[in-house]
């Protein structure tokens, strides 16, 4: 009877230890997960923010990687001249 | 109305609105990238002994454009002038490069500033700095050696040795270029595209016209003796003027 009671108590302590270990594991995982999300480079920290330049400028530069412009014959005296500077 | 003022060490010309907004844009870029200002961000980055630096969003954008230009021109237009572009890493705003490796962003900064200044115009017009320009709406532009062309869309830039002598460095040899051209003018989808392509075409010498044709970029080359060569794309663009109906 006494031996049975000791086994029950030991099982109880084991259950408590398992529960505590599981909770601690979950807690460590959660803290590490949030820490990685907020601090480690390469992890998304939220929505990307624009850099502040006008969107038309961003669009023009993105679209312009060594693509040709459009020219035509001149029709009036030029107000400006291109030259090397 | 046309406004003229000094910016980035050159004459700036603005049409299509007040000069204040484009001038502020140009000043912001010059403040960040002038090598003549010891407190500019570029000067501070080049002086820094650190291997890893966090740079401003504007700096990151300019360096990103410079690295992209180096990739697209296979190193002809290189922000390290041939001293090790492959050792420069930019991830977001984090710059990693060997201490002592100086960056020269002149190859892209003026053109980027012109593009952003033109985007700041309220309507049709143009912004030109030192002869490199971006347009919003058609603008007629005088060309080196005479003549003119209408820039309908994008930008127009000229690179060469006519104004400041042999200042273009060939990153393949790390020496001043001995290109047969004195000035190369290119039409691009933006001033940045035109400027990068003009520098590359100049440095490529005799291969420049075909290199631009392969990218459907109009180019006009003035030789050292004053002779003018237009690549097929340039000549074709002027032949294909829109018909009146």
Image (cartoon, coloured by chain):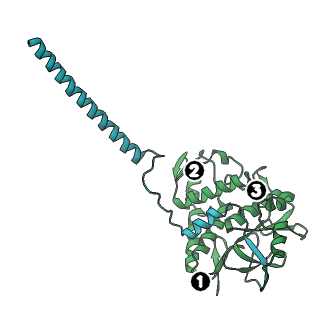
Chain colours: A cyan, B green
Element marked by disc 3: strand
Viewport quadrant of the N terminus of chain B:
bottom right
Question: What is the chain letter for disc 2?
Answer: B
Mark 1 packing: few (<14 Cα in 10 Å), some, or many (20+)?
A: some
Viewport quadrant of the C terminus of chain B:
bottom right
Q: Residue at x 83, y 79 (%)?
A: B147
Which badge, 2 or 1, is on the more N-terminal residue? 1
Task: Judge whether A16 appears above or below B198 on screen.
Answer: above
Q: Which residue is mark 3?
A: B169
Which badge, 2 or 3, is on the more N-terminal residue? 2
* Circles 1 and 3 on the same chain: yes
Q: Give the Cα separation between the discs numbered 1 and 3.
A: 36 Å
Q: Residue at x 71, y 63 (%)?
A: A67
Q: Which residue is mark 2?
A: B90
Q: Give the Cα separation between the discs numbered 2 and 3.
A: 24 Å
Task: Judge whether B201 appears above or below B26 on screen.
Answer: above
Q: For marks 2 and 3, give the one nearer the viewer.
A: 2
Q: Residue B156 location in percent, x, y?
A: 73, 71
Q: Which residue is mark 1?
A: B17
B16 vs B156, left or right, is left
- Say how many tags the image has: 3
State the residue in front, B68 or A70: A70
Quarter occupied by residue B29: bottom right
State the residue in front, B124 or B179: B124
B5 vs B131, left or right, is left
Task: Judge whether B15 appears above or below A47 on screen.
Answer: below
Q: Residue at x 26, y 34 (%)?
A: A23
């Amino acid at each position: 009877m006494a031996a049975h009671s000791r086994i029950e108590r030991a099982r109880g302590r084991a259950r408590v230890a398992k529960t505590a270990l599981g909770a601690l594991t979950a807690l460590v995982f959660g803290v590490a997960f949030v820490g990685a999300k907020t601090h480690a480079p390469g992890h998304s920290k939220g929505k990307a923010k624009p850099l502040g330049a006008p969107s038309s400028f961003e669009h023009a530069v993105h679209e312009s990687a060594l693509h040709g412009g459009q020219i035509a014959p001149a029709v009036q005296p030029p107000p400006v001249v291109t030259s090397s500077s | 109305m046309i406004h003229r003022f000094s910016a980035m060490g050159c004459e700036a010309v603005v049409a299509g609105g007040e000069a204040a907004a484009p001038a502020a844009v140009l000043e912001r870029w010059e403040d960040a990238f002038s090598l003549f200002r010891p407190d500019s961000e570029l000067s501070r980055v080049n002086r820094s002994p650190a291997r890893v630096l966090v740079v401003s969003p504007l700096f990151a954008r300019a360096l990103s454009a410079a690295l992209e230009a180096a990739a697209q021109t296979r190193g002809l237009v290189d922000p390290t002038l041939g001293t090790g572009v492959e050792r420069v890493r930019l991830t977001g705003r984090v710059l990693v490069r060997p201490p002592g490796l100086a960056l020269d962003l002149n190859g892209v900064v003026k053109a980027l500033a012109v593009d952003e200044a033109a985007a700041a115009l309220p309507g049709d017009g143009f912004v030109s700095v030192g002869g490199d320009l971006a347009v919003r709406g058609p603008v007629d532009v005088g060309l080196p050696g005479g003549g003119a062309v209408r820039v309908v869309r994008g930008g127009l830039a000229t690179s060469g040795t006519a104004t400041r002598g042999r200042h273009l460095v060939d990153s393949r040899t790390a020496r001043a270029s001995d290109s047969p051209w004195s000035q190369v003018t290119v039409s691009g989808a933006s001033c940045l595209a035109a400027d990068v392509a003009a520098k590359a075409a100049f440095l490529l010498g005799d291969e420049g016209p075909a290199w631009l044709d392969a990218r459907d970029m109009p180019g006009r080359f003035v030789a050292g003796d004053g002779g003018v060569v237009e690549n097929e794309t340039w000549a074709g663009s002027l032949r294909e003027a829109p018909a009146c109906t």
